[in-house]
Image (cartoon, helix red, strand yellow):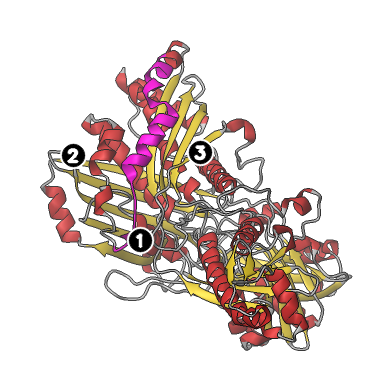
Amino acid sequence: MSKFGQSQSIKRLEDQRFLTGHGRYVDDIAPPGAYRALFLRAPIAHAEIGTLDLEEARAMPGVKLVLSAADLEAAGIQLGMAALTVKNRDGSPAATPMRPILAKGRVRFVGEAVALVVAETLEQARDAAEAIAVDYDELPVHMEVAPGGDVIHPEAPANVAFDWALGDEAAVAAALAGARHRVKLRLVDNRIIVASMEPRGATADWQEGRLHLAFGGQGVWGMKGHLARAFGLPESAVRVTNPDVGGGFGMKAGAYPEYFALAAAAKALGHPVHWMEERGEAMLADSAGRDLISEAELGFDEDLKIVAYRVNILTNLGAYNSGFGQWIQSEISAKVLTGVYDVQRVFVNAKGIYTNTTQTDAYRGAGRPEAIYTLERTMDFAARELGVDPFTLRRRNFIAPAAFPYRSAVGELYDVGDFPKVLSRLEQEADVAGFAARRAASEAAGKLRGLGLCYYIEAILGDPTEGTTVEFCADGTVNLYVGTQSNGQGHETVYAQFLSDRTGIPVDQIRVVQGDSDRIAKGGGTGGSRSVTTQTNSTLVTVEKMIAAFTPFLAEELGAAPDFAEGAFRAPGSNRTLTLVEAADLARAKGREDLLRHEERSTLPGRSYPNGAHLAEVEVDPDTGHVQLVSYTVTDDFGNLMHPTLAEGQVHGGVVQGFGQAVMEHVGYSDDGQLLTGSFMDYAMPRAKDVPMIRFTSEPVPSTANPLGMKGCGEAGTVGALAAMGNAVLDALWPRGVKAVDMPFTPYRVWRWLEEAGAAAS
């Protein structure tokens, strides 16, 4: 039975300060008098650095310090950045070329940091950066997402960083050869710029040999470890904090070179140094998302059941390995390779390619949207080629509800699911039965209407372990320490709401504390849709421990062991009741300091697998190529919801980000590596007028992988949106002879496909 709070949508607690301008973001917390930092960035994509003359800049007014890679090395700082890597299909390690904090000897993409200037004011730093003399000896540029070309790193011949595979290649080839039907599709998943509302920034300061870095991120403990290694410090000598964070989306999850350089400058100067990225700089230097090419092939038997699935991927890593780049289109995307379908013969081969572009890394979904996009676009294409309804083909291949728990071909254990029920609910909510009439009305008006279905599944990622601390303060408030990091999701609300629900402590007396490695010893940060599931499970365990700790103490006070229910302790035979806050006050008065702070860590036994169906309905103007999204319906299985409105908001945001990539967002480079979409004048972002109200319904099948039956929801909207949009556009254009479409579906591209199809037909 749900108590107050749980599964009810209370108002967001943090909104009062955000909406009244009291949020404290990176640029709000710079210490008074902090020096300002500016990075000199490479203006060309690939070149040897001939000379780098910093002396004139160092002598400029107000300049405190100018650093190069050589200066960092001379100070004993580890220059190379850490990154996760995979194993090649032959068992050998993937390429691990050094990604330097500041360019060493060569630049490999436009925007790579070459030098750091620190001055009293930002204007002085800008003037000094212009005085730095750099001679670049240009080298050939490699931009194609394919093996070959002029080598960027000697450690990666033909620019191949890794060659990873999973599955039985021979068995899949044989199954495809014997299949009654075979369908192939090549898809381009375009590169996007994350464009979080708040760009990146940080302040570094040293006090008595101890480093403090405050930065806009998605957790503090990973960054703490990276800094300790780079500076040769024990982790106890590093403090990392996150203030309020204005959007992360995976892009702010990892370490960036700028943070290390700032720390080095602050150490050399003995003074705090602050840096805030400008929007154009963010577009050049922040990790980008997606950017891969997939070739997929499905084999079907005579009953249109899938017998085998094969995918080959070429993924653009950019100029270096980012923190998670190698994992995203290999280990991570493979977790949902087969989606919701009962197929055991699968093979995937992914090759990572270095190009002279900015690195790619996590972006909302990190590999799972890409995998589902490939699978669901191919399934929809197969339905068209085989002359069967897309809903019918999916139903024919769903994992049956009775088959759970189900071990997928890639080893994931799906605990529960009822995909037919979710899909039926979607059909009803979206009025699929009325689509034919709506299409006819569009045709009468000279428009083309299309319906696009995607059925996705997500694998919740990240550390399954999380910790919670509950601390009773003397003023009657309660501190709730958490190991995740909100960057806009509403964590403060849902965590306080959950603790209140379980303890009876009023929500307005609970203060959520996050993002401080001194106050919270360990944490997994936010990413992979892990936060609410892991954190509330940990809170549940901590509350149980807390009540158990208070019980014997109160037994002495009340004369009998009390029960805890409805937010209060009650002893048999006594009419006296004590809330937890009252019990804590009593413990404080009795000198029982041990009862004022309770902490526990817990580990989830398995992943949860949110899933759901998205249906996009679009109308295309054949004269202009403009794609209008006229309706969008989502039915999700997120298990039990803690805060339905926050969950729906996550879906809305994720869908709009997917829509943006599908219809308008696209990173463009020239052949020589110059970014052509370096401002919002050239890089389109979705606006409110572009998107109708998104209809969201919940059809929960509670997870068995956590006590609360939850499934993460933060990335699900994006996972489903890409293929839904792609399938809708193709459905609209298919009657006109267009058989292939790739994102982004911009007016010119759509118009050109229609013109080419018309010319071919005539």
Task: Look at the numbered disc 1 and give the secondary structure of its residue.
Answer: strand
Magenta stretch? 411-440
Q: Which residue is mark 2?
A: 304
**Marks 1/2: CA distance?**
30 Å
The residue located at (44%, 60%) in the rendering is: 460
Callout 1–callout 2 Cβ contact below 8 Å = no
Residue type, numbered disc 2: Leu
The residue located at (26%, 42%) in the rendering is: 184
* 605 horizontally vs 407: left or right: right
Would residue 492 be visible to someone looking at this image?
Answer: yes
Residue 305, image x and y in percent? 19, 43
Residue 442: which quarter of the image? top left
Q: Which residue is mark 1?
A: 351
Q: Which residue is mark 3?
A: 696
* 431 horizontally vs 687: left or right: left
**Marks 3/2: CA distance?**
31 Å
Q: Which mark is residue 403?
A: none
**Marks 1/3: CA distance?**
37 Å
Would residue 105 be visible to someone looking at this image?
Answer: no
Residue 423, image x and y in percent? 36, 38
